[in-house]
Amino acid sequence: MATMASMASMATTPTIGTYTKSHIAESLFWLDGKPYSLHDYPFLSAIYDTGAREILMCTSRQVSKTTTCACLMLTNSVARNHFRTLYVAPFREQTSRFSNTRLTKIIHYSPLIRQYYVDPTLPNNVLLQILRNGSEMALSYAWDDPDRVRGITADCEFVDEVQDVLYESVIPVIKECMANSDFKHMVYAGTPKTVENTIEYLWQLSSKSEWIMKCEGCGSWQFIGSAKSIGKHGIVCLKCGHALNPRIGQWYDFMPGAKIRGFHVSQPMLPRNVEMPARWEAILEKLESYSESMFKNEVLGISDAIGARFISLDEIVSLCEDYFVDLPLSPVVSQDVRAIAAGVDWAGNGEGYKSRTVVWVWGVLPDFRLKTLYYRIFPNANAISDVEEVVRIIEQCGAQYVVGDAGEGAVANSVLRDKLGSHRVGQAQYGGGAGFSKLIRWNRQGTKYLVNRTAAIDTFMLQLKKKAVIFPHVRQMATPIQDILSEYESTTSPVGGGVGKKVWLHSPNNPDDCLHAQIFGWFAVKVLQGAIEMYEREIVEEP
């Protein structure tokens, strides 16, 4: 292994050369007052040294996931001059904690890093670290709104606590930050929760690599895939019950050749947890006291259970009445309607997930209930190609005001304004989950509504619960019902001793576009009713 002195000379070396990343980390970094070592984490060397461009660490709690992210970031930064790294967690508190308790501590308590790479005249704060060799480490946060990371240039990106990140809203935008890089390395890390969230989606796309151990009793190879591997004194073979040694193992790819190299790491894999009776006793206590789902998530690092639904299938079906929607609008369907508004959720353009444009037209009844007058789901994942038809639908339905999604549809909304007039078109963008508690507010430029996604879904779901919404015949609502039911309630991972935040999530495999078109249309109704302020005429629109 290289000495610390020889590694320090790499401050001016542009490439890693013959040194592995794991050797660099062990040679240069200090943690908790002593040199960093992978001795008690034998499975981590492969994670450091893999040549895969995309890595997923699917882990339980307390297995050095966050420390590994910090060390990997620093390894890249010291090994290559002017290397640019972007770290993103769902919320600011998580990013601040990572920056202060992991990244900054390793930098300032590692003697050679402090001596050769730290320059007090360069930025050194929670959201930006610049080393003497020109390498930059930018830190940000985004669970539903990626605007903070737009414009950042990166060679390598880390998305931590990825289970709490909305894939289709955030990940494609983050990846665009590496568009001009020759490296384009992506690292995802997190702890599984439900089988529907982002980390499980990524795991299914990955190599599904497991740490397999050879049983000295029967010669079979085993990995930890359930609580059945938890014996009274350590990990046991599922075939013969013989004890397994987690120090003697190797990674095995169950899906070789997958785009993402996915590593599953659990607490029983840590040799010290098996070798120290008090540590193993703590795992056994969790097995007894935790729920099955919690034990799988927190101790085994395995996804489990279905997310909690606020509204049931039966409740949604009860909102369906005996009519069908079509164009032109039937006089029977539009009877007694006092006002008409529409919402548009534009298709996204990210890879790997299902997204489509949906337009939803509401009619306001005398008792203020919202009645579905028409809706259309467009199969193309291209918002611009759908604009002309959306305009035709809005005109045919006579919608007085339209709110379009500004997250992916800024250009499409601009075309709508040109066709319908700016007085009839507004735009809204989700992005308030971590930034403000109110349902809706203006952005600083006065060009769009910024909407607290969690509060918006909460409030609209309550409208469904209160039967303030009418849907057409259930046979015509099959897909929209699935979109509504794809959204589930979750609580994000707590920071320190705090509590997690309530959020709404959905699997990238299960689109929710109909739900959000309904919500944007509901906002448009509120504008017509004077409950939400319309755009001021004198405000200059964004190009």
Image (cartoon, rainbow, N blue to C red):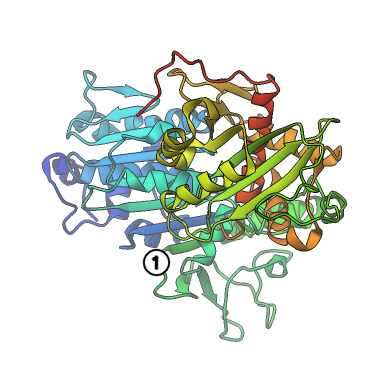
Q: Position of residue 358 (x, y in %)?
A: 58, 50
Q: Position of residue 129 (x, y in %)?
A: 31, 29
Residues 104 and 372: in front is 372
Left or right of 252 in this view: 472: right
Above or below, 163 against 253 in this view is above
Residues 222 and 323: in front is 323
Q: Secondary structure at mark 1?
A: loop
The quarter holding residue 118 reads top left
In the picture, which quadrant includes the N terminus?
A: bottom left
Above or below, 533 against 497 in this view is above
* Residue 169 in sight in this render: yes
Identify the amino acid type marked 1. Lys
Residue drawn 44% across the image and 27% down it:
100
Q: How many numbered circles does the render carry?
A: 1
Residue drawn 21% across the image and 29% down it:
115
* Residue 279 in sight in this render: no
Above or below, 340 against 266 in this view is above
Q: Position of residue 154 (x, y in %)?
A: 29, 42
Residue furthest to the front: 331
Residue furthest to the bottom: 218
The residue indicated by pointer 1 is: 259
The quarter holding residue 31 reads top left
Residue drawn 33% across the image and 28% down it:
128
Q: Position of residue 338 (x, y in %)?
A: 76, 31
